[in-house]
Image: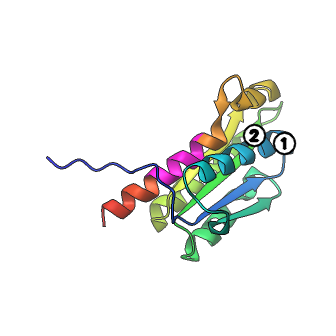
């Protein structure tokens, strides 16, 4: 039996990070975590690009544009959606999750680092707080998936 696994070596990979500015104090921490992960795993600064969008709702259109350029081996989508008192949360979180369909359709892996929490405190806990940094986790998943896809060619 042949087993395929992606490595965590980011050397030579070109990666775009797309971040939603809404809830920026949380998202900046996610961006910092993702960029730290990418750099520590060998992705060179010259191979990194960061695009800011207004919020998580706008992530899919920019992720799609970057993935379709052919310039990137992976994209990392970052944002924070905190539940409020209206159904707005459901629409924004659902739209942000569409980045998964973009990855599946286009073949460019998208690390999903969009927090969908009940409270702002829960978001802080997941953006470098006591529950780690989901930006780091999304970046690591993007590296591993990009390497796995390359291995499967």
Q: Where is residue 36? Give x, y as percent.
A: 67, 47
| SS assignment at label 2 | strand
* Residue at figure coordinates x 74%, y 50% from the top left: 56
From the viewer's perspective, tell me whether residue 51 is left or right of residue 16. Answer: right
Q: Verify whether residue 135 appears in magenta.
A: no
Q: Would residue 60 appear left or right of 88 to someone viewing this image?
A: left
Mark 1 or mark 2, earlier in chain: 1
Image coordinates of residue 48 in percent, x first then y, are 66, 64
Q: Front-most of 49 and 77? A: 49
Q: What is the magenta range? A: 137-144
Labels in figure, total: 2
Q: Is the C-beta separation of discs 1 and 2 under 8 Å?
A: yes
Q: Residue at x 66, y 69 (%)?
A: 46
Q: Position of residue 35 (x, y in %)?
A: 68, 51
Residue at the left extreme, as displayed:
1
Main SS, magenta region, reads: helix
Near mark 2 (Cα within 10 A), the count class, few <14, some 14-19 or many ≥20, is many
- Residue 23: give its label: 1
Which picture quadrant has residue 74?
A: bottom right
Q: Nearer the viewer, residue 125 or 90?
A: 125
Between residue 75 and residue 40, name the one nearer to us.
40
User: Disc 2 marks which residue?
Assistant: 81
- The chosen color scheme is rainbow
Residue 38 position, x and y percent, is 60, 52
Q: Quadrant of the C terminus?
A: bottom left
Instruction: Determine crowd level at label 1: few under 14, some 14-19, many 20+ residues with C-alpha closer than 10 A.
Output: some
Q: Residue at x 86, y 40 (%)?
A: 25
- Above or below, 33 against 128 in this view is below
């Amino acid at each position: 039996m042949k087993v395929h696994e992606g490595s965590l070596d980011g050397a030579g990979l070109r990666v775009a990070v797309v971040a939603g500015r809404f809830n920026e104090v949380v998202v900046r921490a996610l961006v910092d975590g993702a960029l730290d992960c990418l750099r520590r795993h060998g992705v060179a600064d010259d191979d990194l690009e960061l695009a800011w969008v207004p919020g998580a709702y706008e992530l899919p259109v920019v992720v799609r544009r970057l993935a379709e350029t052919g310039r990137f081996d992976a994209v990392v989508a970052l944002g924070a959606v905190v539940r409020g008192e209206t159904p707005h949360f459901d629409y924004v979180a659902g739209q942000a999750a569409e980045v998964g369909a973009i990855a599946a359709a286009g073949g460019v892996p998208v690390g999903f680092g969009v927090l969908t929490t009940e409270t702002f405190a829960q978001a802080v806990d997941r953006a470098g707080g006591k529950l780690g940094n989901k930006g780091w986790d999304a970046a690591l998943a993007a590296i591993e998936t990009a390497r796995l896809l390359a291995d499967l060619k």
